[in-house]
Image (cartoon, rainbow, N blue to C red):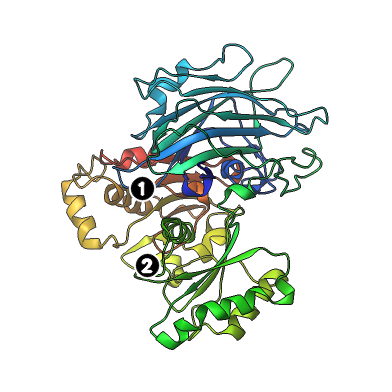
């Protein structure tokens, strides 16, 4: 009997056009869109209806995921809990604008699975949320697919909220659950049942009553993981398992449900495929490569990470015990991988362009005195002035289309050009952040890059995916 798992941790937000509603500004992360894919104590509230959320799993093009269940939940004690929506599953990146506007209504008041999947523009599911029980603690739908959809992208459209009357507007979403398998899995005759008692998190009481569902059991039974690296010392590696068992039995860690795993650079310690996937997920979510000797504690449902420190010469029973005990006592600072802050926060090759790293994100991007134009991207190689000059020679008066290559490099060219044009405006910052070495909020992780504008009122932030196949133009960036 096959046992599906919650796949949420294997997905990233590719795009979202619904914004978020918050009374205290953009920095109020209690309402961001990626809250609805986490098993945390936070809720997402969009600014509008017909909001399109596109998720993708970073995997090779010849691989896919298999979806067995779709779960959606909305809080009851809000004015606008999610009522209905659609789900698409595709192999290629969806062009939402080409088809989504044809699906603005859900016929009837029940969930419908669509079996005609000849086109990627046709949804696999239209879902409708009903009250969970007489306690009125929320609205929920748990749908098991009769035909398992497979792909690399998931598009979820939040159509409308439970609202007696009036125009469509904001929608509150508590949780979106994607359950199934990573990889192509044939349809089984029978699936193991989902957990019956899933009671992990207490939602804020002004929003809704405590959840009666808990998805922690679907996280491969490993919500909190301590990853300890091997080293070049065979004797130390032989003692590693005994050392981790001793630490896990410490009195201060009773009831913490910590799971310990060995990590090795050559993956020799990965006897199971799911272990290798776990370590790959951790490196991806931390936005860094793990370099031994190291120990990392991962609170996977909350997406939080704690690092033992870069200057630890080796992992011992003493420092590993101290690391875990301090975490249990709430004394460890959150880990945010960050490159060094450059002098004056500037790129030495481009003096008008600001460089944002994880440790300066709040001070620069969230500065309420300035507007910020920011390009967030992932590239292991720096963009040099020589490359800029080459692009500049191919541009039309410096404002026309940038010649090949397209993608990240053309956007960086436009960014540096704009920074030079507006450098005298003291209250406007033009900046970039390379996530290859820096932590950023999840909603800015994208394989193509994200161009975002943060006005002084950060709640009005807007963003768009950077063009990947067509070179960007300076004039396009000026319009942002």
In the picture of the structure, the residue carrying the numbered disc 2 is: 267
Q: Position of residue 417 (x, y in %)?
A: 31, 51
Q: Is residue 295 left or right of residue 39?
A: left
Q: Quadrant of the C terminus?
A: top left
Q: Position of residue 309 (x, y in %)?
A: 53, 77
Say which of 138 and 348 sits in front: 138
View extreme (right): residue: 135
| Labels 1 and 2: the sequence-earlier one | 1
Q: Is residue 464 visible?
A: yes
Q: Position of residue 201 (x, y in %)?
A: 72, 49
Q: Is residue 302 left or right of residue 78?
A: left
Q: Is residue 323 visible?
A: no
Q: Secondary structure at mark 2?
A: loop
Question: Going 48% across and 76% down the picture, which residue do you hit?
Answer: 294
Say which of 129 and 336 sits in front: 129
Q: Determine whether 454 is above or below 380 in the image.
A: above
Question: Going 55% across and 76% down the picture, which residue do you hit?
Answer: 308
Q: Position of residue 160 (x, y in %)?
A: 62, 22
- Local packing at callout 2 (Cα closer than 10 Å; few below 14, some 14-19, many 20+) is few
Alpha carbon separation for disc pair 1 and 2:
18 Å
Q: Secondary structure at mark 1?
A: loop
Q: Nearer the viewer, mark 1 or mark 2?
A: 2
In the picture of the structure, the residue carrying the numbered disc 1 is: 59
Give the number of the disc on residue 47. none
Question: Going 35% across and 45% down the picture, which residue do you hit?
Answer: 448
């Amino acid at each position: 009997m096959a046992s599906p798992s919650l796949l949420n941790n294997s997905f990233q937000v590719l795009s979202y056009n619904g914004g978020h509603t918050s009374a205290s500004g953009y920095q109020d992360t209690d309402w961001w869109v990626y809250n609805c894919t986490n098993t945390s104590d936070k809720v997402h509230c969009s600014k509008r209806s017909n909001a399109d959320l596109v998720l993708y799993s970073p995997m090779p093009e010849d691989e896919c995921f298999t979806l067995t269940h779709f779960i959606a939940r909305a809080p009851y004690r809000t004015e606008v809990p999610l009522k209905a929506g659609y789900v698409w599953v595709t192999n290629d990146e969806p062009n939402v604008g080409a088809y989504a506007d044809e699906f603005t209504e859900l016929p009837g008041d029940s969930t419908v699975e669509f079996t005609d999947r000849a086109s990627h523009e046709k949804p696999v599911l239209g879902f409708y949320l009903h009250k969970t029980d007489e306690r009125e603690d929320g609205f929920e739908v748990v749908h098991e697919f009769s035909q398992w959809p497979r792909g690399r992208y998931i598009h979820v459209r939040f159509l409308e909220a439970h609202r007696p009357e009036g125009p469509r507007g904001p929608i509150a979403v508590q949780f979106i659950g994607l359950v199934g398998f990573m990889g192509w899995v044939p349809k089984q005759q029978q699936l193991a049942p989902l957990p019956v008692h899933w009671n992990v998190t207490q939602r804020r009481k002004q929003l809704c009553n405590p959840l009666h569902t808990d998805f922690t059991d679907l996280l491969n039974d490993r919500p909190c993981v301590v990853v300890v690296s091997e080293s070049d010392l065979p004797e130390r590696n032989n003692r590693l398992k005994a050392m981790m068992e001793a630490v896990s039995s410490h009195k201060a860690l009773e009831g913490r449900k910590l799971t310990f795993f060995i990590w090795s650079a050559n993956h020799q310690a990965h006897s199971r495929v799911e272990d290798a996937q776990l370590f790959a997920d951790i490196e991806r979510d931390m936005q860094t490569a793990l370099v031994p000797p190291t120990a990392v504690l991962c609170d996977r449902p909350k997406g939080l990470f704690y690092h033992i420190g870069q200057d630890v010469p080796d992992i011992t029973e003493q420092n590993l015990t101290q690391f875990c005990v301090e975490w249990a006592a709430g004394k460890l600072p959150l880990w945010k991988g960050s490159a060094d802050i450059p002098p004056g926060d500037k790129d030495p090759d481009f003096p008008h362009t600001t460089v944002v790293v994880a440790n300066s994100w709040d001070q620069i991007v969230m500065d309420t005195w300035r507007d910020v134009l920011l390009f967030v991207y992932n590239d292991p190689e720096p963009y040099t002035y020589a490359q800029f000059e080459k692009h500049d020679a191919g541009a039309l008066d410096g404002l026309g289309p940038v010649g090949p290559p397209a993608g990240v490099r053309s956007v960086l060219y436009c960014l540096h050009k704009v920074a030079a044009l507006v450098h005298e405006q003291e209250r406007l910052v033009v900046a970039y952040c390379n996530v290859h070495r820096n932590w950023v909020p999840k909603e800015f992780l994208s394989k193509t890059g994200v161009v975002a504008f943060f006005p002084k009122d950060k709640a009005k932030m807007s963003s768009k995916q950077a063009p990947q196949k067509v070179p960007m133009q300076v004039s396009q960036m000026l319009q942002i």
